[in-house]
Amino acid sequence: MIATRIAAALLTATTLTATTGCSTEQSAQAQEPAPTATAATSESLKPLIKQPLPDVDGKTFTSAIVELPPNVRATPHRHGQAFVYAYVLDGTVRSQVDDQPVTTYHQGDNWVEQPGAHHVLTENTSPTEPAKLLVVFVSNTGDALKVNDPTS
């Protein structure tokens, strides 16, 4: 219950900042190089805000937009020890975390991923329309936000 309230508050703050186009020091920090896809055959991650959490040593708050082109499936991955909140802004996304059932999320739906979770499936189900997520990370400062599984 508390995690849901925190996630809702973080989503509200992030959405307000993203939609009002606030120009703050934190927004400028989000322009740091980040892992992004260079081809339309992969997802992209565009940070919006990245800043240390006040009064929580060693933790950083990051919000980002993840875009999935049509028919794209992300490489299975982890988010280290980050707590992750995802909200579908546009489109439809199928997702599976750990051994949970595959779930289809539509615009306005959301989910959380616990620290250490394995995100085994993330895909845009549309053959013609992109999907877009707002993703919020509470991570250990300095940790990578996404680490793809090694390829065989």
Image (cartoon, helix red, strand yellow):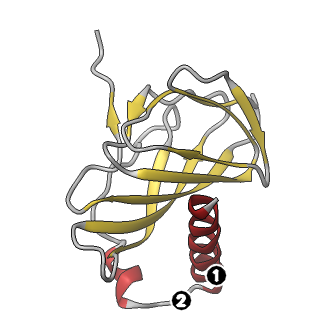
Q: Residue at x 71, y 29 (%)?
A: 103
Q: Amino acid at mark 1?
A: Leu
The label number, if any, that marks residue 131 in the structure image: none
Residue furthest out toward the front: 1
Q: Is residue 104 above or below residue 138?
A: above
Q: Residue at x 57, y 74 (%)?
A: 14
The label number, if any, that marks residue 16 in the structure image: 1
Answer with left or right where residue 99 lies relative to residue 24: right
Q: Is residue 118 above or below residue 105?
A: above
Q: Residue at x 23, y 63 (%)?
A: 141
Q: Quadrant of residue 93?
A: top right
The residue closer to the viewer here, 39 or 9, is: 9
Q: Amino acid at mark 2?
A: Cys
Q: Quadrant of residue 99?
A: top right
Marks 2 and 1: CB-CB under 8 Å?
yes
The residue closer to the viewer here, 116 or 35, is: 116
Give how far apart the Cα atoms at labels 2 and 1 are: 8 Å
Answer with left or right where residue 30 lies relative to residue 89: left
Q: Where's residue 50, x and y in %? A: 36, 72
State which quarter of the image contains the C terminus. top left
Q: Residues within 10 Å of mark 2 (few under 14, many from 20)?
A: few
Q: Is label 2 or label 1 in front?
A: 1
Q: Residue at x 75, y 39 (%)?
A: 105
Q: Where's residue 138, x and y in %? A: 40, 61
Q: Where's residue 79, x and y in %? A: 37, 43
Q: Quadrant of residue 5?
A: bottom right
Residue occupied by mark 2: 22
Circle 1 — which element?
Answer: helix
Q: Where's residue 77, x and y in %? A: 39, 31
